[in-house]
């Protein structure tokens, strides 16, 4: 199976993994609106021995089978000021 990765034109560090070739008409409308114009990053073969940063190849395959995509969101922004205030009591 081939997988394509697209980055969002609207949201930083937001990526969409889809089976290649991608059919964006199958995505939920709210996701298409928030994601913006997809920009292709790469296409690769899903092989069990391949290492992915945020999930396993098996987990990605399950997402690509149902619901047909995997949305990778950036980690939440760390609020250092809040952490400092809490540490001060």
Image (cartoon, rainbow, N blue to C red):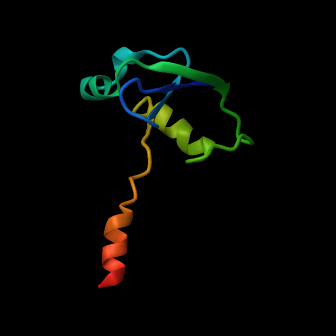
Residue drawn at x 49%, y 32% is 64
| Image position of 21 (left or right of 14) | right
43 shown above or below 81: above
Residue drawn at x 62%, y 41% is 57
27 shown above or below 48: above
| Image position of 62 (left or right of 10) | right
Residue drawn at x 44%, y 44% is 74
| Outermost residue toward the right in this view | 49
Residue in the foreground of this view, choosing between 65 and 46: 46
Q: Please provide percent x and percent y for residue 43.
A: 62, 22
- Quadrant of image for the C terminus: bottom left
| Outermost residue toward the bottom in this view | 89
Q: Please provide percent x and percent y for residue 86.
A: 31, 78
- Quadrant of image for the N terminus: top right
Residue in the foreground of this view, choosing between 17 and 74: 74
Residue drawn at x 36%, y 80% is 87
76 shown above or below 87: above
């Amino acid at each position: 199976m081939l997988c394509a990765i697209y980055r969002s034109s609207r949201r930083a560090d937001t990526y969409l993994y889809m089976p290649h070739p991608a059919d964006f008409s199958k995505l939920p409308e709210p996701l298409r609106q928030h994601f913006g114009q997809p920009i292709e990053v790469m296409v690769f073969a899903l092989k069990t021995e391949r290492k992915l940063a945020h999930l396993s190849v098996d987990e990605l395959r399950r997402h690509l089978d149902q619901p047909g995509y995997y949305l990778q969101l950036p980690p939440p922004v760390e609020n250092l000021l809040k952490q400092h205030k809490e540490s001060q009591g």
